[in-house]
Amino acid sequence: MIDKEDLLNNKDFYKSFKNGEDLTSFFKQMHKRAV
């Protein structure tokens, strides 16, 4: 399990996404896996 706080505070993590849409689709994928 990833620590959400660590992820949210990780600027390099955000930079790894080209744009907001990439980020959104990533979280949708994460959500599907979590449920």
Image: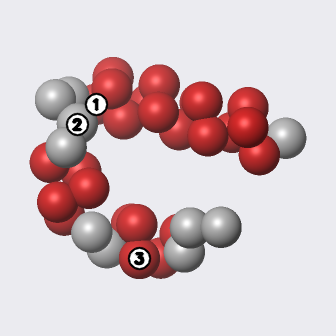
> Residue beneath label 3, please?
6
Q: Residues within 10 Å of mark 2 (few under 14, many from 20)?
A: few
Above or below for 13 versus 20? below
Q: Residues within 10 Å of mark 3 (few under 14, many from 20)?
A: few
Question: Which one is closest to the eye, mark 1 or mark 2?
Answer: 2
> Residue beneath label 2, please?
17
Q: Amino acid at mark 1?
A: Gly
Residue in the image at 24% along x and 51% along y = 14
Q: Are marks 1 and 2 in contact (CB under 8 Å)?
A: yes
- Disc 3, SS: helix
Above or below for 34 versus 24? below
Q: Amino acid at mark 2?
A: Phe
Q: Amino acid at mark 3?
A: Asp
- Disc 2, SS: loop
Residue in the image at 31% along x and 73% along y = 9
Numbered circle sitting on residue 20: 1
Question: Which one is closest to the eye, mark 3 or mark 1?
Answer: 3
Rounded to the nearest angstrom, the CA distance separating label 3 from label 1 is: 19 Å
Above or below for 31 versus 29? below
Instruction: Judge from the rendering whether residue 10 lies leftward or rightward of residue 15; answer left or right.
Output: right
Rounded to the nearest angstrom, the CA distance separating label 3 from label 2 is: 16 Å
Nearest the camera: 26 or 24?
A: 26
Instruction: Judge from the rendering whether residue 7 lies leftward or rightward of residue 35; answer left or right.
Output: left
Rounded to the nearest angstrom, the CA distance separating label 1 from label 2 is: 7 Å
Q: Position of residue 29 (x, y in %)?
A: 60, 30
Instruction: Judge from the rendering whether residue 15 lies leftward or rightward of residue 4; answer left or right.
Output: left
Mark 3 or 2, nearer chain start: 3
Mark 3 or 1, nearer chain start: 3
Q: Position of residue 17 (x, y in %)?
A: 23, 36
Residue in the image at 65% along x and 67% along y = 1
Q: Position of residue 33 (x, y in %)?
A: 73, 37
